[in-house]
Image: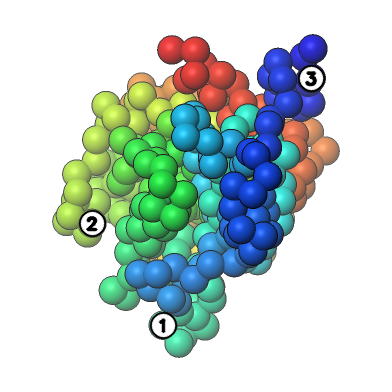
Amino acid sequence: MTISNNSLSLSMPPQDPPAGAVSQGDAMYDYGSTTVFTHRNDPRFAYTLYVPPAIRQPSNNVELVVAVHGTDRGFIKYRDAFAGFARWNNCAVLCPLFPVGVLGDNNRDGYKHLLEGDIRYDRVLLDMVEEVGSRYVKTFDTFALFGFSGGGQFVNRFAYLHPERLWAASIGAPGSVTLLDVNRDWWVGLRGIEQRFGKPFDLEALQRVPVQMVVGKADLETWEITHREGRGSYMPGANDAGATRPERLRTLRQTFETAGVKVQFDELPNIAHNSLQTIEAAVLDFFATVLSTRRSQ
């Protein structure tokens, strides 16, 4: 019998491991929708997980999906939004928490640009991935990455630095974009990325990553995303990609496709700036399709 839900299907329901395979405490807090863990390498950061029962089996093909919150830091709702998908598609879900004001300055935006003071948020995430693998005796050499709003900015920039670590990337409704344009300075473009991060941009690796860009057609508020001189991360060209999130994402798509990076572009009718509606309407199907192709190869 085939069970279908939101384009997710498999021939048999996922099987729980034998009773007694883990302690009652582990079963309650470390599997399924987990508790919140402090990141062992830097306790300023934390994460929560969804861990499917199949990960306890000696032989499994569990994949990892990472979902990065927006400015609201709603990381637990992201875990819950992906939990059903993860159970039926044999995936673990990692949702990091990058708090406001890590350096004591009430900065809400540091993680979006990957670099804040001496903090490299891309490395923090990669350390978390390694930590989760160690916790569950599973190696995640690659993973899928989704982010919405501020998290969409994170995915946009992380994909430039670490495309070899991604089996899919979904960039959701970023308020600001870093264009695939080596003639513009970072963060508006890519010029200076190697000097800033110590790693060159690998276009060929990015061309191998299935990329989705997704935004609601009604996501038209500009009060939070208009850059003003002398404030925040303003730099010349900060508003050049467009006034609204759909306009900016279309411009980002154009630079990707000009560089030979294929993009699935989903502009969703009747949706404004709503992460959960966006996940349900388009992101789950995108990851399910990529995952099916990946597992059939």
Q: Residues within 10 Å of mark 1 (few under 14, many from 20)?
A: some
Question: Between 264 and 224, which is closer to the camera in this rendering?
Answer: 264
- Give the residue type at disc 3: Ile
Sooner in the amino-acid sequence: mark 2 or mark 3:
3
The residue drawn where x is 34% and y is 31% is: 206
- Give the residue type at disc 1: Leu
SS at circle 1? loop
Where 272 falls versus 164 (above or below)?
below
Residue at numbered disc 3 = 3
Q: Position of residue 240 (x, y in %)?
A: 47, 49
Residue at numbered disc 2 = 197
SS at circle 3? strand
> What whole-number distance in Å separates the C-alpha atoms at marks 2 and 3?
45 Å
- The answer to whether the residues at label 1 and label 2 have Cβ atoms under 8 Å apart is no
Question: Between 231 and 25, which is closer to the camera in this rendering?
Answer: 25
The residue drawn where x is 54% and y is 24% is: 291
Residue at numbered disc 1 = 103
Q: Would residue 176 be found to the left or right of residue 190 on screen?
A: right
